[in-house]
Amino acid sequence: MLATLEVALPVLYAIAIVVLTAYGGNLLWLALFHAGNEQLIDGPVPDHTSVPAPPDDWPVVTVQLPLYNEAEVAHRLIDACVDLDYPREKLEIQVLDDSTDATTERVANRVDYWQAQGIDIVHVRRDDRTGYKAGALANGLRLARGEYVAIFDADFVPDPDFLRRMVPHFFENETLGMVQARWGHLNQDDSLLTQVQAFGLDAHFAIEQHVREQADCFMNFNGTAGLWRRTCIEDAGGWEHDTLTEDLDLSYRAQLRDWDFKYVPSVEVPAELPPDMNALRSQQFRWAKGGVETALKLTSRLWHSDEPVRVKLQGTFHLTAHFAFPFILLAALTHAPLLLLKGLGHGPGEMYFAVMGFGLFGFLGFFLAQLFAQRRLYPDWGHRLRLFPAFMAGTMGLSLSNTNAFWQALRGTDTAFIRTPKYGGDGSDGWWQSRYAMADLPQVVWWEALLAVYCTAGLGIVIALGEWAAIPFQALFAVGFILVTASSLSQVFTVRQATPAQA
């Protein structure tokens, strides 16, 4: 048994570190590209002058609002879209409502109200949820009259000038298929959980999306807060629902058809972040599983295309980003036992651990991507960097759930599109009294609790062995699983104790 462990543990840990270093190295490249091509300043640069000249004749735009049981936020979203500053005769709003609860009645009342005010707004219902969000968007597109299609999820609140700042970009480039805005955050200061989520999303938008566009690599529509040329959607084959990330899927299919994408970081559309851990875990599971499904579907097609090798490499890292989670979990399971083996006088020698130290380059990539993102967006970026350890710990804490998503995608397991609950973000009673608050504890929480105990015991072993350099790494695993478990348990308890909101 000991002989087997002497071989297996070093090999498994080395595989995990090599893979994670590769993904961290890609982030390092993105961060350094940003640093080499952008002036490093504190806070966002006002960018209103970058808006192209308006067209002589504004095109017809259809705004699609896919909803499913969004009673707390539907009213806010509809009103924000009605307030868009755009020629009324050129604006159509479709509320694509697949709801099965009080949302439908609320939407119907609000649509009736605005129709009476002369607004071109329609309430689109389907007999079933075939294709989930992708099916709703495809059905709406069939009925739409717009040459361009803007999409907003239920928790987003676009500013009135959104279309006037986004539409002109299409008149600069006839092969431009999609323009993506940057996500903002309505409730990022509500708790540590929302702060950490905002911290992670900022790096995606300020660094990943921006650099991929600047480097002429493939980027993606983020499912909301974007504007499509209708002919691009149709030429790429339309919305497909064989993955849970229909946005990423269509993005790559469109770019493989030689359509260009543009990212406009100066246009910010704020949205509500999930305020509870169980909702966040559900959202991350869907993103992870859908990302893996899309990678399995399109990576081969990408490599068989005529795109340059750098585009293929960056696209592969992008599509397979969620492949990293099984290796995060593998590192968590093998790190402390490997050091214990070393402490007992077995296992690999010092050279092995010296080579594994190169994994710090991967860690540097994660850190610099976050640092440059915060510096790009916020004047108080130095203060905000205190969230980095919590962000890393949270990423590790969600590795079990996201690894489950990875394996389900590999096995081809069908999974329903589980919407992320939205609570409105401004309710005086708190999100836990919403009809959508999750009162059931997912089974995965108990496995996360077990990992919290395992990694905490490992931390004790690492300290006892005097492996001081390894303590921060092991501590991140322990704290990550502790935080995820404790948040899930406390939030479910809070929901169960709260008085249920009335429909």
Image: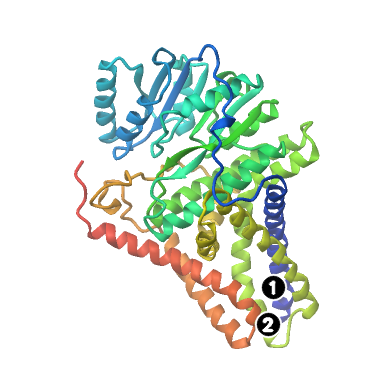
Q: Amino acid at mark 2?
A: Leu
Quarter of the image with the C terminus is top left
Query: Residue 280's spot in the image, x, y percent?
Result: 44, 52
In the depicted view, which residue is nearer to us: 334 or 85?
85
Q: Residue at x 61, y 19 (%)?
A: 171
Q: Amino acid at mark 1?
A: Leu
Can residue 104 be seen here?
yes
Residue underneath mark 1 = 9
Q: In the picture provided, is 364 more to the left or to the right than 202?
A: right
Q: In the picture provided, is 464 more to the left or to the right than 81?
A: right
Q: In the picture provided, is 121 more to the left or to the right than 361?
A: left
- Vertical position of residue 409 compared to residue 25: above or below: above
Q: Say what secondary structure mark 1 lies in.
A: helix
Q: Residue at x 48, y 71 (%)?
A: 452
Which quadrant would residue 245 be assigned to in this image? top right
- Alpha-carbon distance for marks 1 and 2? 9 Å
Residue underneath mark 2 = 341
In the depicted view, which residue is nearer to us: 33 or 449?
33
Query: Residue 156's spot in the image, x, y percent?
Result: 41, 38
In the depicted view, which residue is nearer to us: 364 or 13?
364
- Vertical position of residue 112 compared to residue 65: above or below: above
Q: Say what secondary structure mark 2 lies in.
A: helix
Return the disc, 1 or 2, that comes first in the chain's sequence: 1
Pointer 1 with pointer 2, Cβ within 8 A: yes
Q: Residues within 10 Å of mark 2 (few under 14, many from 20)?
A: some
